[in-house]
Amino acid sequence: MTEVENLAPVTIDDVHALCDRYRTWGKWGPDDELGTLNYIEPEMITAAAKLVKQGRVISCALPYDGNGPQNGWGGRVNPLHFMLQDGGDAVIGAQDHMAKLRYADDAIYMPLQCGTQWDALSHVFYDGKMYNGYGIETVSSTGASKNSIDKTTEKVVGRGVLLDIPRHRGVPWLEPGQGIGSAELAACAAAQGVTVGRGDFVLIRTGHIAQCRDRGSWGTYAAGDAPGLALDSAHWICGNEVAGIATDTWGMEVRPNELTDIFQPVHIVLLVNAGLLIGEIFDLEKLAQDCADDGVYEFMFVAGPLPFTKAVGSPLNPLAIK
């Protein structure tokens, strides 16, 4: 059992101080829309490819189907799958206008952030601004003209690292309301024998999905209380200049939030100000078991979003390749 970090109470002034300290607006120029993905250099990708030793590919995506975790919060529902053409159409002759060939087609309706997903840098605003100082008016009913997810479709490739916080603590999962700070992130990496640095993608397991599976229900997984990153984690995350982070929770940060003055304050620091790529609802259970079995917590990570033009988020199938 690892001693859990004792996190100090925070105030809105602490949030603003973190925003000021880790703001990267202008760091990569006044027109930048990539944020921390700029940390990734070509040589980092070639080095990541050398981590592939066994050719083992592990998906970190939940299935996109009606059994997902969404409960309607904010209009987010689970994917709805419809058949446009199926075997019945062929049987009744609806496809007889084609010689010999018969086919099936389908469609899906889904909010882009209803399952395993990336937040675009246009997803969250604070005081009317998003990353790099772009105004809230740049996201309209036609989509985001700045910081949209399609700007990142060729950028989310590199070295991935899993930090398995429950195994580090010696528990099956973290409980809702338990926060993860910088000291614990650093200690977990050290215990796993892995370093984290510039341009890495860090996947942080809390075990929240495992807990839901154990009880046989998603319960309040969507928008409810959850374990997650505390504000203090910004020091380790930004200090290591990582390219992106992803967690196995609905909203990445600890809930209830550490203060009531700002909803999802860690998003304000990391997404809006630091320009950090954030992933949520990643299924890290299979990867965590694999890493525990072979003791290897680093891998090539390939996780490009779908190129939805002007979208503020995207589903994906993140792959850890070992």
Image (cartoon, helix red, strand yellow):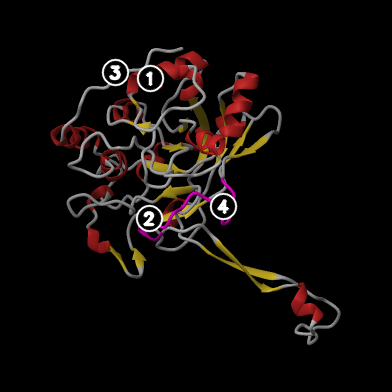
Please tell me whether mark 2 or mark 1 is closer to you in this view: 2
Mark 1 neighbour class, 10 Å CA radius: few under 14, some 14 to 19, many 20 or more? many
Q: CA distance from mark 3 to mark 2?
A: 32 Å
- Asked whether residue 18 appears in the rendered view, the answer is yes
State the image coordinates of residue 150 (x, y, percent, origin top left). Answer: 45, 57
Question: Of the residues tagged 3 and 2, which is closer to the observer?
Answer: 2
Q: Find the distance from the CA under tag 4 to the CA under tag 1.
A: 33 Å
- Asked if residue 63 lies in the magenta stretch, the reply is yes
Name the residue tied to disc 4: 67
User: Mark 2 Cα within 10 Å, few/some/many (few <14, many 20+)?
Assistant: few
Q: Earlier in the sequence, mark 2 or mark 4?
A: 4
Q: Residue at x 42, y 47 (%)?
A: 222
Q: Which residue occupies 71% across, 28% down?
A: 54
What residue is pinned by disc 2? 73
Alpha-carbon neighbours of circle 3 within 10 Å: few (<14), some, or many (≥20)?
few
Of labels 1 and 3, the one closer to you: 3
